[in-house]
Amino acid sequence: MAHTELRWLRFSLVFVWLWTAFVSLWEWHGQSLALLASLPDTWPGLKPALIAAGAATDALLGLWLWWRPGRPAYGAALIVMGLMTLLATAIDPGWWLHPLGPLSKNIPIAAALLLLWRLDTRA
């Protein structure tokens, strides 16, 4: 695969992470809270903390993939995506059945990250 094609693949992942961070904050009182609706309200700060932490993590990963791509960034993105997928599944497994695929999209994203990780020659 040509270097240019890999760069486009990487930038598409950068877009996913940065856009997800932006939308998580933009939709703070809408879809972001709706995703966490099934969580109990025992600690009022839990849901906002999860939204903020998720958005910050997405932004950091997007910037890392943009400015310092390489195996550490691809590996971290894969691990974090896996953990977020497990957390989202625990919160509401029904997201796997959503017609627009908010969780199922992570399968091809994982494949793209693995491909970039395997083909990267930098340390």
Image (cartoon, helix red, strand yellow):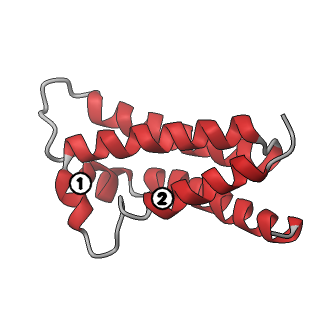
39, above or below 28, in the image:
above
Residue under label 2 = 23
Query: Quick one: quadrant of the C terminus?
Result: top right
Residue shown at 81%/41% (left/top)? 68
Q: Nearer the viewer, residue 122 or 86?
A: 122
**Secondary element at tag 2:** helix
Q: Nearer the viewer, residue 27 or 19?
A: 19
Residue shown at 34%/74% (left/top)? 100
Q: Which amino acid type is marked by label 1?
A: Ala
Residue 36 placement: quadrant: top left
- Residue count near mark 2 (Cα–Cα under 10 Å), binned few <14, some 14–19, many ≥20: some
Instruction: From the top left corner, tell me how far across and down residue 52 is, in percent.
Output: 45, 37
93, above or below 75, in the image:
below
Residue shown at 66%/44% (left/top)? 74
Is residue 73 left or right of 21 when viewed as pictured?
right
Label disc, if present, on residue 34 of the rendered structure: 1
43, above or below 5, in the image:
above
- Residue count near mark 1 (Cα–Cα under 10 Å), binned few <14, some 14–19, many ≥20: few
Q: Which amino acid type is marked by label 2?
A: Val
Earlier residue among tags 2 and 1: 2
Instruction: From the top left corner, tell me how far across and down residue 85 is, in percent.
Output: 37, 46
Is residue 104 left or right of 46 when viewed as pictured?
right
Q: Nearer the viewer, residue 83 or 91?
A: 83
Instruction: From the top left corner, tell me how far across and down residue 110 is, in percent.
Output: 53, 54
**Secondary element at tag 1:** helix
Q: Are marks 2 and 1 in contact (CB under 8 Å)?
A: no
Judged from this view, the residue extending furthest toward the bottom is: 99
Residue 4 placement: quadrant: bottom right
C-alpha gap between disc 2 and disc 1? 13 Å
